Image (spheres, rainbow, N blue to C red):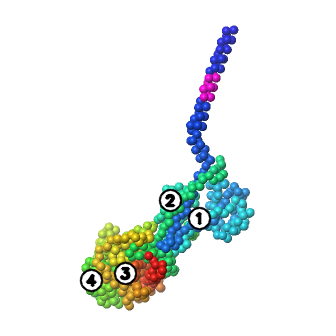
């Protein structure tokens, strides 16, 4: 009996302990629920919302680029795209095959579509074709019953109204690559495009704008249920350039089928009004993406349409350098306005003969006449007197042999050699014969077209270190360019020689003279040899440029400014393998300057 009582007490105690345990467990659960549902309510509400709400970046409209008169140079236009949602197409391949009957797809395009379909969920829209015309949109809509899963979407794409005429200024946009720095969430957006060249690249961050946000409610599978909130982004900044679209178009058209570059500057402000490198590419094509075959055609073209020759083209300046040689000698005091040399058509230095372009020579000639007739012998002798170091000093002060730094990519420095450079480069001393050929802009000397335009602008404005820029000048801002340390009288002699080149019979650019409302042009022609003329060829007769293969013809150069009195514009022109500075390059420079003066005379002047 006692044993039964003991068992009962044990059971009661155990039940009591179990009950207390259950009660305590219940209290813990209640406390935990209170902690989670009340104390931590805000935290878990946020986590739940994050699972339910999807935030997406909205791409802002890219900034517009204008010329100085607010002419559109780069803008955005309506872009119709054909998109496909795979889950809405019972048979994706059959739908693509039906689409190809309406609109061709290359193998590369089709492969990319299939790759995108594999990478993304079945409800995510995939681009099939973009930049559709109205006719193409109509075809797709007309055949919609045969194209399940395909629909038309409207967006924005970059458009360049002037095409290749502005290509090497404006550049183009293209898709973000793996090598692009991802410093902005926008760069992670599929298909987002950024500036890859030109102004588009230079002002990328300003043109890009700031992304907006779109909040969407999605289900557990990520499907959009409804739009919750939309915050528009900030459009990119507008950019106004110094370029005048009318002068740019004129410059490009003047080249025709020729290859080369031309730059037109305001000599007082440095504003670049025209900046041409030809042939060029169509930025609209590169922005949309081109095939490997098309890219190969561009990159292997012997006239190099992808290279910005205005900044990256390196050319011997030829006789356009003679103003520098003359000014260096005048500044050094080794010649004066009265110094006369005799040109017999050739001169000897040691056992080497140096020839003038005029076989039987120019006779007695002074510095102004030497510039006018472009006498090689005068400048051989002058360079021998002054030496390369003084020539290099003057050349650099007028903008040669160093980058102008307008902000565009791949600009070359060029080369202005001196005795120290040669010793460091080759471990050799400078030779007298190298003075002679340097005096006529040959030998080691290399310049870019924009440097030649800069040199001419600094001569024209009286020796002020104006710097080229694509920024439109502020009329209210006073520009204080540093004065180059050269005599105004000596600079005046050089300018007189340039004016006689164009306006006096016998000048090498006399055929390109003009008189517009009493305004004239001053300039200097040049031809840069790309091959050596042998003694045998000189004796039998030098082969005419037109009879040589294109790549063996001389480069044609011309630099000029206008008006002759109170100059406003300067131009530098290089025509690759053009043969003749006076016959090919000078007419381009003349007509570009004349166009600028004519526009000044209209109701819409070039400021």
Tell me the number on the disc at residue 156. 1
Element on which disc 1 rests: strand
Percent x, y of residue 540: 41, 88
Mark toward the viewer: 3 or 2: 3
Rendered residue at 38%/75% (across/down):
268
Q: Which mark is residue 336?
A: 4
Sequence-wise, the earlier of marks 2 and 4 is 2
Rendered image: mark on residue 566: 3
- Residue 371 on image: x %, y %: 34, 84
Q: Cα distance, mark 1 to mark 4?
A: 64 Å
Q: Position of residue 382 (x, y in %)?
A: 29, 81
What kind of secondary structure does the magenta stretch mostly adopt? Answer: helix
Find numbered disc 3 in the image and state the secondary structure of the residue it sits on. loop
State which quadrant residue 529 falls in.
bottom left
As measured in the structure, the alpha-carbon distance from the residue carrying label 3 to the one carrying label 4 is: 25 Å
If you read the primary sequence from the N terminus, does the residue marked by circle 1 or circle 4 appear first?
Answer: 1
Q: Residue visible at 36% across and 76% down? A: 458
């Amino acid at each position: 009996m006692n044993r039964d009582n003991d068992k009962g007490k044990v059971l009661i105690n155990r039940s009591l302990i179990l009950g207390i345990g259950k009660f305590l467990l219940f209290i813990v659960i209640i406390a935990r629920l209170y902690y989670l549902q009340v104390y931590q309510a805000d935290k878990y509400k946020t986590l739940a919302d994050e699972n339910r709400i999807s935030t997406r970046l909205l791409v802002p409209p890219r900034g517009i680029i204008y010329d100085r008169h607010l002419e559109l140079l780069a803008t955005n236009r309506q872009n119709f795209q054909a998109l496909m949602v795979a889950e809405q197409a019972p048979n994706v391949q059959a739908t693509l095959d039906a689409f190809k009957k309406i609109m061709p797809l290359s193998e590369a395009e089709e492969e990319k579509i299939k790759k995108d379909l594999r990478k993304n969920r079945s409800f995510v829209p995939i681009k099939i074709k973009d930049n559709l015309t109205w006719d193409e949109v109509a075809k797709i809509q007309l055949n919609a019953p045969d194209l399940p899963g395909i629909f038309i979407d409207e967006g924005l794409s970059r458009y360049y109204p002037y095409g290749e005429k502005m290509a090497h200024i404006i550049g183009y946009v293209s898709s973000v690559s793996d090598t692009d720095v991802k410093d902005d969430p926008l760069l992670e957006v599929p298909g987002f495009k950024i500036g890859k060249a030109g102004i588009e690249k230079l002002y990328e961050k300003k043109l890009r704008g700031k992304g907006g946000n779109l909040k969407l409610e999605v289900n557990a599978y990520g499907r959009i249920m409804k739009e919750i909130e939309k915050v528009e982004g900030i459009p990119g900044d507008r950019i106004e350039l110094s370029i005048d679209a009318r002068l740019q178009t004129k410059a490009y058209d003047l080249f025709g089928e020729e290859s080369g570059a031309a730059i037109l500057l305001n000599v007082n402000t440095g504003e670049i009004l025209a900046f041409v490198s030809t042939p060029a590419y169509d930025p609209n094509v590169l922005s949309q993406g081109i095939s490997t075959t098309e890219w190969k055609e561009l990159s292997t073209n012997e006239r190099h349409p992808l290279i910005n020759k205005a900044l990256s083209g390196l050319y011997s300046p030829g006789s356009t350098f003679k103003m520098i040689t003359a000014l260096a000698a005048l500044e050094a005091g080794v010649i004066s306005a009265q110094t006369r040399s005799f040109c017999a058509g050739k001169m000897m230095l040691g056992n080497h003969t140096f020839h003038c372009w005029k076989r039987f020579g120019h006779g007695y000639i002074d510095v102004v006449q030497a510039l006018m007739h472009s006498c090689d012998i005068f400048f051989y002798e002058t360079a021998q007197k002054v030496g390369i170091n003084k020539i290099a000093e003057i050349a650099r002060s007028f903008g040669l042999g160093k980058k102008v730094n307008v902000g565009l990519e791949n600009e070359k420095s060029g080369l202005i050699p001196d005795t120290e450079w040669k010793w460091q480069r080759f471990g050799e001393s400078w030779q007298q014969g190298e003075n002679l050929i340097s005096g006529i802009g040959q030998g080691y000397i290399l310049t870019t077209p924009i440097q030649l335009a800069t040199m001419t602008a600094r001569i024209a404005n009286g020796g002020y270190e104006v710097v080229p820029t694509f920024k439109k000048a502020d009329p209210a801002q006073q520009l204080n360019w540093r004065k180059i340390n050269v005599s105004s009288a000596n600079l005046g002699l050089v300018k007189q020689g340039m004016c006689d080149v164009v306006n006096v019979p016998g000048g090498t650019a006399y055929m390109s003279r003009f008189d517009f409302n009493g305004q004239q042009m001053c300039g200097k022609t040049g031809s840069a040899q790309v091959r050596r003329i042998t003694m045998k060829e000189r004796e039998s007769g030098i082969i005419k440029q037109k009879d040589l293969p294109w790549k063996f013809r001389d480069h044609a150069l011309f630099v000029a400014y206008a008006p002759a009195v109170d100059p406003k514009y300067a131009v530098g022109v290089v025509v690759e393998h053009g043969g003749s500075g006076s016959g090919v390059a000078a007419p381009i420079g003349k007509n570009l300057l004349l166009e600028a003066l004519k526009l000044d005379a209209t109701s819409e002047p070039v400021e």
